[in-house]
Amino acid sequence: MPVYFKKEDVENKIKVSILSKNNIGLVPTMGSLHEGHLSLIENAVKNNDNVWVSIFVNPTQFSSSENLNKYPKDLEKDVVLIKTISENINIFCPSETEIYGGIPKLKKYDFDNIDIELEGRFRVNHFNGVATIVSKLLELFKPSSIYFGEKDYQQTQIIKRLISLEKINVKMIICPTIREKNGLAMSSRNNLLSNFDKKNSSIIYNSLNILKNNFKNSDLAKIKKEIIYNINKNPNFKVEYFEIANAKTLQIDSVINPEKSYRAFICVLVNEVRLIDNILLN
Ligand code: PAF
């Protein structure tokens, strides 16, 4: 079996799967796989007849100021890791031309403003870029289920809306965040951290937990401020945002309504490496 397939091979294999009434599970990734991705793939293998993992560092979700070329890549290792789960997993690792034809272009969607909150405030058009590639992958693979990690919660909400906007018949499965022993959420970007910064990054998940434990406290704003101050005390760390937002709309409500569900979202630049995490508060 080839290690990875060309787009025409994918189209042919998908036709065969559909004719044979096989369930297709798709795990879209940008490679540099870690245990978080592996848990998505394992979940897909358990619940589908055919599993595809796509590996594509999508240019349209990076803004010009973010260094696309700095994104970690290790295709050979990724293939080995995938094959440790099952030899039968199919890998699609397309070129930019296979995906975008000519110059990569993003499509703009109306996401009811959830794309401009939180990450969207700092990464203009990031979620339009994510939606553009996911839409193309959904069209190509026609999966029964598509898998994402809860670490990128805002991304999961965008995809949910994309599926509804484009009326796509697919089940989105959100799998729990997998963490390092010190609580740091697994991310391909962790590979860019020094051991020292990685160790100190435990403060990110600890901070989310402190906020969760104090969610009923009337002086939440003060607690938030203290947490930000504590993180920023580390000269390599800079909090980009630390917000409590409505879990559905991702809007930052000024008054907490106990009937609604909230999450805390954080982004810390650790020596320029963007680390994000989030937690359910109630
Ligand atoms: O979460 C990611 O790795 C990417 O945003 C995704 C969903 C693979 C789209 O490029």
Image: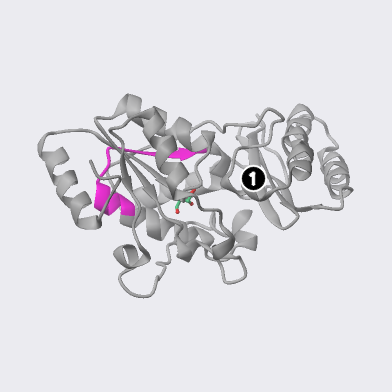
Q: Amino acid at mark 1?
A: Asn
- Front in this rendered view, residue 137 or 107: 137
Q: Where does label 1 land, which residue? A: 190
Query: Where the N terminus falls, by quadrant?
Result: top left
**Is residue 117 in sight in this rendering?**
no
Locate residue 144: give its quadrant.
top left
Residue drawn at x 63%, y 46% is 191
Q: Quadrant of the C terminus?
A: top right
Q: Nearer the viewer, residue 72 or 128?
A: 72
Q: Which residue ends up furthest to the top in the rendered image?
A: 46
Q: Is residue 122 above or below residue 280?
A: below
The answer to if 182 sits in the magenta stretch is: no
Left or right for 191, reference 147: right
Depth check: 131 or 221 in front? 131
Return the x and y of residue 20 as percentages of the image width and height.
11, 34
Tag 1 secondary structure: helix
Q: What is the span of residues highlighted in magenta in the rendered image?
A: 137-149
Residue 104 occupies quadrant:
bottom left
Residue 143 magenta-highlighted: yes
At which x and y percent is residue 81?
Answer: 44, 36
Q: Label 1 neighbourhood size at 10 Å, few (<14), some (14-19), many (20+)?
A: many
Residue 246: x and y in percent read 61, 42
Q: Is residue 6 left or right of residue 12?
A: right
Residue at image position (85%, 39%) is: 223
